[in-house]
Structure formats: structure tokens, C-alpha cells
Amino acid sequence: MPFRHRAAFTLLELLVVLAIIGILLGLLLPAVQKIRAAAARISCQNNLKQLGIALHSYHDAQSTIPPGVTSARPGEPFPRMSWLTRLLPYLEQEPLWRASAAAYEHQPSPFVSPPHIGLSMPVKVFACPADGRALDPQNTHRGRRVALTSYVGVLGTDYTRTDGVLFLDSRTRLTDILDGTSNTLMVGERPPSADFWYGWWYAGFGQAGTGSADMLLGARERNFGGGFVSTCPRGPYSFRAGGMNEQCDLFHFWSLHSGGAQFLLADGSVHFLSYDADPVLPALATRAGGEVVALP
């Protein structure tokens, strides 16, 4: 049989093949990133829906929406507890709730872990999957290791007022929301601060003890001032895009989703608001302001 030589790739042909592969990868990667971003946004929306169901279930059982954060007043069994912690029994987290209640009975300060294991224990439904930082405990100032949340209660205009749904020692009933539950914001997206000092789900102090900027936030929040935010402007702050490494962005609602953030309304529905909605956000954040405003 005659001997046959097998044809080999020339260098030019190899370069053409590599170029085609490079082009295909260049087209594929943005598509994959868009799919991941869309999946994270849907998962984040589902988290907010679960929080809405839990808030309404709490209201059905207690006749009020939980306090945004509880003060350390005399006789209070759960000082500095967040509204998120009170939702644990309604989010299939009954064991963690029992552990939290037992920890408070043993040690009133929620910032001692243990026994307050919730302080450093991430809860999946409290974290937007677009922000991997909230999925794991993080180290912050004063040697603390804390679990974080991507969702903060809407306290109203700013920390000096109590015109929203969730605020210090609040006991808001759905019937108190005179502007209408379908036109009133209850929870919104705001990633934890760059230094992880703000955005704890379990318990917190916030600005002037109001929980502001920690587990609560106003639509036109102001900076009370402090050691870790002393260089930030006093505000008021507006609804706009932010950055994970920008400490001052803790004072306004924003998200890692493109173009805006998702909000849970008092009727339990979830809506994505673009940053263009900033002018009407203060009206949507108050429960009984009497403003005539439609959801964008």
C-alpha cells in the first residue's frame, strides 16, 4: 500500500481557529454574566417576598408589624433586637429563634457571641446572592465577627422622624398605613457598609440608637456623624447607585442590580424601582403623609 502523509495544521490555520474560539468566548461570557445577574435578581426578589409573607404572618399573630429595632429600655427582654430576628419563627428558623431567646435570657447584651450565636450566623433569606459578602460572617471593628443583611426596613424620611413603617420601638398596624399598603415601602435593598459596621441582621444600635443605617434606613437619610462615617457628607442622601467600597453609600438605598433596587411594599408585593424614581421615594417611604403619588 502506498504510504500516505497526514495533512497537519499550518500556523496560520491554528491562529484562525484560536481567533474564532476567542470571539465565541467573548460573545458567551457577557451572556453568562447576564444570566447570572438575572438569576440573582430573581432570587433576591424571592427573598423579599418571603420577608413580606413573614411580616404579614407576624402581624396576623401579634396584631402589629414587628419593631424596627428595640431600645434598651428597662424591662425590655430583647434590647437592640432587629425586626429580622423577630421574623425567624415565620421563616422556618424556629431553632435559631429559640437559641436567640435563650441567649437574651442569659446575656441581655446581644453583642456577646456566644451565647448570641445569631450575631455571626448568616441566614440565607437575609442576603442577596448578588453580594457574596452577606453570605458569610465578616470581621469588623472592635474585634467583632458579624452576619449581615442586604435588606433594611424603611423607617420613613430620616432617623429624626418616625413616619415610616419600621422604626425604633415601632408597633405599626396595617390600618395605620393611611397612604395605602400598595403605595408604601416597607423594606428595601441596601448592601452592608464597606467596613461591615452597618448592616447587621441580628441586632444593632445604628445612628443615635435609632437603628438608622444599620437594619433601618430613611429615604432621605442624614449622617448623624461618628468615628466610622465622620468624613461622609451630612446629607440628606438620595436614591442612587452605590459601590461596595464606598463607605458613605450606607446612607441611601441601592443595590448590586443594574439600574435600581428592589423594594417590598406593605401589601407584600415586590417592585423594582429605577434610580429615576428618586423624586417620589420620600412620599412612598411615609405611611401617612397624605401624598398623592403613584408607584413608578
Image: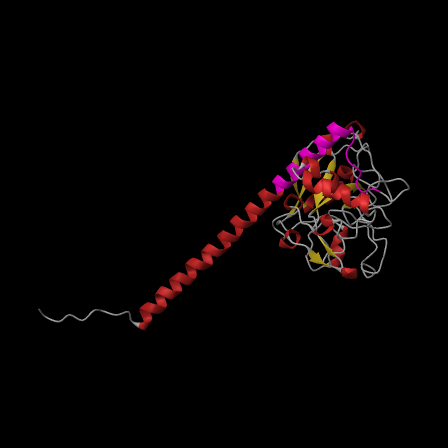
Q: Is residue 219 visible?
A: no
Residue 25 image position (x, y, % from top left): 44, 59
Question: Which residue is at a point 31% across and 68% down the rendered structure image?
Answer: 13
Magenta highlight on residue 53: yes
The relative height of residue 30 versus residue 179 in the rendered view (above or below) is below
The location of residue 240, given as percent across then percent down, is 71, 50
Quadrant of residue 49 within the rendered picture = top right
Compared to residue 177, the image places residue 219 above or below, namely: below
Magenta: predominant secondary structure element?
A: helix
| Quadrant including the C terminus | top right
Residue 10: image location, x then y, percent: 29, 71
Please tell me which residue is depicted at 15% across the width and 70% down the height of the picture. Answer: 4
Left or right of residue 170: residue 249: left
**Residue 45 in the image: x percent, y percent?**
62, 41
| Magenta range | 45-70
> Please, is residue 43 above or below residue 176 in the view?
below
Q: Nearer the viewer, residue 26 or 192?
A: 192
Quarter where residue 5 is shown: bottom left
